[in-house]
Image (spheres, rainbow, N blue to C red):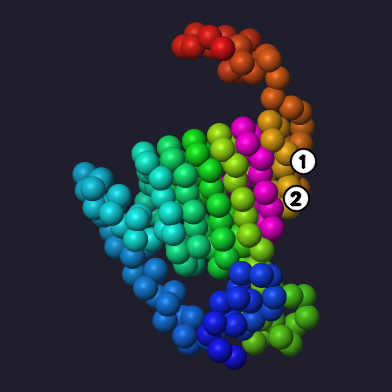
Amino acid sequence: MELKEIAERMRDGRLYYSNDERLLKIQLACMENVYDYNLTRPLEQDKRAALLEKIFAEIGKNCYVEPPLRANWGINTHIGDNFYANFNLTLVDDTDIHIGNNVLIGPNVTLITGTHPVRPDIRAKTAQYNLPVSIGDNVWLGANVTVLPGVSIGDNSVVGAGSVVTKDIPANSVCYGVPCRVQRKISKRDMLFYHKDKEIDLEKP
């Protein structure tokens, strides 16, 4: 199969074999940059910023990723402005991951686009297909959240720690669980209180 066709299959959800040597060669270049990023020292902020621009397809202003970072490709991940990811962000970005502005990601979060068919004989030959992931603006993913292939999370939503997100999450939702379910909508009370009866005293809405 021509490399161009494989690339098309990677993006449109069709099956392909992921062990093609030409793919692995391209992927290694990303992995080298990720390796270099994870070896940077805390004071080497300019070096980290330059490496993130090499690793990702797009990255906005005021973005920070706490090492270690893991990414299958890097070049399929698009990140907006004011992004923060705590340590151990894992991006299985065999196709596009789109992350909006003002997104906050807790430690040990995994965003997955690549998956495999149930049929065992072709799976044994590394058959794979990919479905994109989309994270909207102002989203907060808590620690140890896993987002599965094909999922979109709407603007302003909060996903509780340890959740496994298997289906789309609408905007302005508070959700958690395994599988992750919407528990409630963000309310006027959330604009006034940050925890139980603790009132927000920094800025008034």
Q: Report the amino acid beneath label 1.
A: Arg
Q: CA distance from mark 1 to mark 2?
A: 8 Å
Instruction: Give percent across and percent down for residue 1.
Output: 59, 91
Q: Which mark is residue 167?
A: 2
Q: What range of the chain is rendered magenta?
A: 143-159
Tag count in the figure? Answer: 2
Whether residue 111 is in magenta: the answer is no
Up the image or down, 29 lies above or below 44; here it is below
Residue at which label 1 appears:
181
Residue 115 place in picture, x, y as percent: 66, 69
Placement of 91 over or under 64, stated as above or below: below
Q: Position of residue 46 (x, y in %)?
A: 23, 48
Q: Residue at position x 58%, y 81% from top?
A: 6
**Along the line of sight, which residue is nearer the eye, 112 or 79?**
79
Disc 2 residue type (three-letter): Lys
Please report the residue visible at 50 percent of the width from the left and 8 percent of the height from the top: 201
Graded by Cα atoms within 10 Å as few (under 14), some (14 to 19) or many (20 or more), the crowding at tag 2 reads some
Q: Secondary structure at mark 1?
A: strand
Q: Is residue 138 visible?
A: yes
In this rendering, would 18 be left or right of 86? right
Q: Which mark is residue 169?
A: none
Can you give x and y, in whole percent of width and height, for residue 90 in the image?
50, 57
**Which residue is found at the position 66% from the left and 40% from the top?**
154
Query: Relative to the observer, which residue lies in front, 96 or 167?
Result: 96
**Along the horizontal axis of the image, is 88 left or right of 9?**
left
Query: Residue 54 appears in which quarter of the rendering?
Result: bottom left
